[in-house]
Image: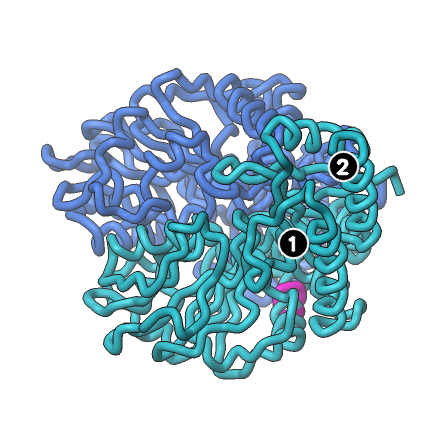
Chain colours: A blue, B cyan
Amino acid sequence: MPERIYNFSPGPATLPYEVLQEASRDVLNFRDKGIGILEISHRSKEFSEVIQEAEADLRELMDIPDDYYVLFLQGGASTQFAMVPMNLLMPDKKGAYLNTGTWAKKAIKEAKTIAKVQVAYSSEDSSFDHVPTDDQYDVDEDAEYLYFVSNNTIYGTQFHKFPEKGKMLVSDMSSDILSRRFDIRPFGLIFAGAQKNMGPAGVTVVIVRKDLVNRAPENLSTMFKYKTHAEKGSMFNTPPCFSIYCVGRVLKWLKAKGGVDAIEKINREKAKILYDAIDNSDFYKGHARPDSRSFMNVTFNLPTPELEKKFVEEAEKEGLSGLKGHRSIGGIRASIYNAFPVKGVEELVEFMKEFERKNG
Amino acid sequence: MPERIYNFSPGPATLPYEVLQEASRDVLNFRDKGIGILEISHRSKEFSEVIQEAEADLRELMDIPDDYYVLFLQGGASTQFAMVPMNLLMPDKKGAYLNTGTWAKKAIKEAKTIAKVQVAYSSEDSSFDHVPTDDQYDVDEDAEYLYFVSNNTIYGTQFHKFPEKGKMLVSDMSSDILSRRFDIRPFGLIFAGAQKNMGPAGVTVVIVRKDLVNRAPENLSTMFKYKTHAEKGSMFNTPPCFSIYCVGRVLKWLKAKGGVDAIEKINREKAKILYDAIDNSDFYKGHARPDSRSFMNVTFNLPTPELEKKFVEEAEKEGLSGLKGHRSIGGIRASIYNAFPVKGVEELVEFMKEFERKNG
């Protein structure tokens, strides 16, 4: 293994090295077939097995009931911002949204061009430093769903208790899918770009209750209907084969690790190490309110922007990479998804202590 | 190098082995940064260079003028079937289409749900065995563009002379982009899924005249507007990074080969070897009319479906893979894109002769 840096990037993010080794081998020669994984036909027996196993493993890991489809689509979460209301609200139904950050805002903006929208709550006035509890908002009775972003990558907040309001839930789980156990039943639809907890960029997983795919208006473009992809097992057209293959490998890795319960324990441990370091210091200050703190993206500030810049630069030299906060809030962000090793978090904490000693 | 089969698959298709070797290395450690190409942030300096170089190399290879955008999108050609009329025809303009096969038909069907459509020509009555010449059809004066599929993968036909009718051309070049030199100026828009001549599945290249991206209606969803992607250099949201990286490597390979002129010569040579073998035999019968024959997908029949089945099975055993014709027309299809080696074509011809001798 070449010397690996610790990659705190918010996504595309670090992947298990075992998965990279498998991919590196399979790109040249897949299952000893004399053909690489990038070159095999999506209609081949080999690729059918790849996509079917990925689906089966995701179902097992997340305990997805049979009355939900699992789809592997393209276009990222940004495409889902439109597809969700197109399929579930068109032509004139209403969706309720919780505005807890940039990605929620974008979803709201998109939905407004397509259907009716109720913004049931917004934490924008306090720099999106928290997510709401159910007693803080109401959902209109005629809203078809309540949409929320389970983890807000940019601000470092996360729902630790999911909403229990509205007819059904819809969630963008791009940055914390598979990081913890939860019950899918209250959800009509969940989507997630792969490039944080599931694999490389290029594929979006959509988990949708089967009855919902029939709601789309007939004249909606074929590719934007969930039904199209549901009926063809995500193979209506050529899927993003390699990204799906990688997701499959990551799911196998997660199963070998002990599954979602095991990784949740590790995720809590990693987050605690970092938040403890922040809380035990007057030099570092967490952005998110403690009750809304994300276990995936830990955001904090230093006394000045100059010190933050220096922190990022010096960390980079120590092999602690990608710590610069999102341009919209600045500061520091450590993204510690499933595949991020505990040791990297420990090294960051050591670096933080050392940096504070020198600059505090 | 492990023993490689000859992969005649129509796409995802064979890639240059040198590209696979580079990808195999870079998946583990990209540019010695201690981080794999699948893991690097799309906002990093490294990835910016990857996408910018890919664009520059494509512009150089295809001689794309400055007044065209080059976009790297997701969703495949099937998404373009909707995006083209959404961006260029909405709400009530007309597009003219040449119906020369399955992919043209799908594009027509999609466009009809979005705008007005003139089907100016159809070769469906003769099993799509040819493409038209300009004297065989008229384009309505109020049609904004004339849409055609430059190469019909399934039927093995290809336009050897592009149409010179209509206000501007729009073309699906998924299966023959970069296979030959042509002048882009008459085109308003060209799109191509990467998985035949450019790389693996998961990215679609769109080349669009700059003025055209402003035609889209304001309320079109953000992700479906070319303008969104044009303004952000294909980085409005997380792009399919690895597929774009691979396209970049394939473009470097093509440049090293001598570019489009050099590969066109090789493509003509490969096609001639195969068509000569067909023409010099009474056993094999080409599907496409000689003047419409594709240099990318060579389609032919044997005397009976049983013999065709036997042919495919025995070829497979000899390491000549993926020769089964598309289910809609049956028979044999040999896809011989840019990266397919001359030697593989020669071996197929040897096999054909041998098979005829034994079964003829």
| Residue B18 place in picture, x, y as percent | 81, 54
Q: Residue at x 18, y 47 (%)?
A: A117
From the viewer's side, name the closer residue of A14 and B19.
Answer: B19
Above or below, comparing residue B7 to residue B91 in the picture: above
Asked if residue B64 lies in the magenta stretch, the reply is: no
Q: Which residue is mark 2?
A: B356
Quadrant position of the C terminus of chain A in the picture: bottom right
Image-quadrant location for residue B188: bottom left
- Mark 1 — residue? B199
Does residue B342 sit above or below A141 in this rendering? below
What number is the disc on residue B217?
none
Magenta part of the chain: B48-53
Residue A274 at x, y = what percent? 59, 38
Q: Position of residue B43 (x, y in %)?
A: 58, 60
Residue A135 % position (x, y) = 21, 31
Query: What's the CA distance linking mark 2 and mark 1?
Result: 35 Å
Q: Residues within 10 Å of mark 2 (few under 14, many from 20)?
A: some
| Nearer to us in this view, A192 or B302 | B302
